[in-house]
Amino acid sequence: MSDYSVEKMSECFVHQVYEIENDLMGNANEQTILKTIESECLNYYILIESDKVIGFFECKILSPEAELYSIAIDKNFQGKGLSNILMNEFIKIAIDYGCDTILLEVNRINNKAINLYKKYGFSEYGKRKNYYGDNDAILMKKELI
C-alpha cells in the first residue's frame, strides 16, 4: 500500500486541486480556490501520494460547527477507499477545533457520497428543494458529542 498524507493545502497545489475539481464537478475556478486557502475559516485539505494531489476536501470551521463543502478523489484513484482517509481527517480536525456538529449538503442523486456519509454516522435532517437544478439537496449532520 502506498504512503498517503493529508495536509492543509498550500498555494503550490492549487492547480492540481483545480484539475481534479474541474474534472469531477466541472465548475472549478483557480482564483476561488486560491482565495479559499487565504481565508481564516475556509480550508482545503489535500490527500497526497508522492507529491501528487489525489484527493481533497473543502471545509468551513466555525466552532461549534464544521461544514463539509466538498470531498473528491481523482478519478484514477477512486474505488480504493481513499475517501475514508479524508473523512477521518476531517472529523479529527473538527474535533480538534472543538466542534460538536458537522453539517453538509449533498445532491440527492449522489448515492456514492450519501453512502459514505451514512457510513460515518451522518443523518438526514432536511432538504433544499431543487437546489441542484431539478434535484433536491439533502441536508445531513453528525453530532460529535
Image (cartoon, rainbow, N blue to C red):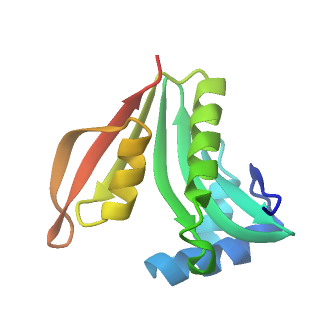
Residue 71: x, y in percent?
Answer: 52, 59
- Above or below, 37 against 90 in this view is below
Q: Residue at x 63, y 33 (%)?
A: 92
Can you name the residue that lies furthest to the front here? 1
Between 44 and 144, which is closer to the camera in this rendering? Answer: 144
| Quadrant of the rendered image containing residue 98 | top right
| Quadrant of the rendered image containing residue 89 | top right
Q: Residue at x 19, y 72 (%)?
A: 133
Residue 64: x, y in percent?
Answer: 49, 23
Residue 35: x, y in percent?
Answer: 64, 61
Count the marks: how many?
A: 0
Can you name the residue that lies furthest to the right here? 50
- Above or below, 71 against 140 in this view is below
Q: Residue at x 79, y 59 (%)?
A: 10
Q: Is residue 29 visible?
A: no
- Above or below, 16 against 138 in this view is below
Q: Is residue 35 visible?
A: yes
State which quarter of the image contains the N terminus. bottom right
Left or right? Give the position of 138 relative to 117: left
Residue 100: x, y in percent?
Answer: 47, 21
Left or right? Give the position of 141 relative to 40: left
Left or right? Give the position of 53 relative to 61: right
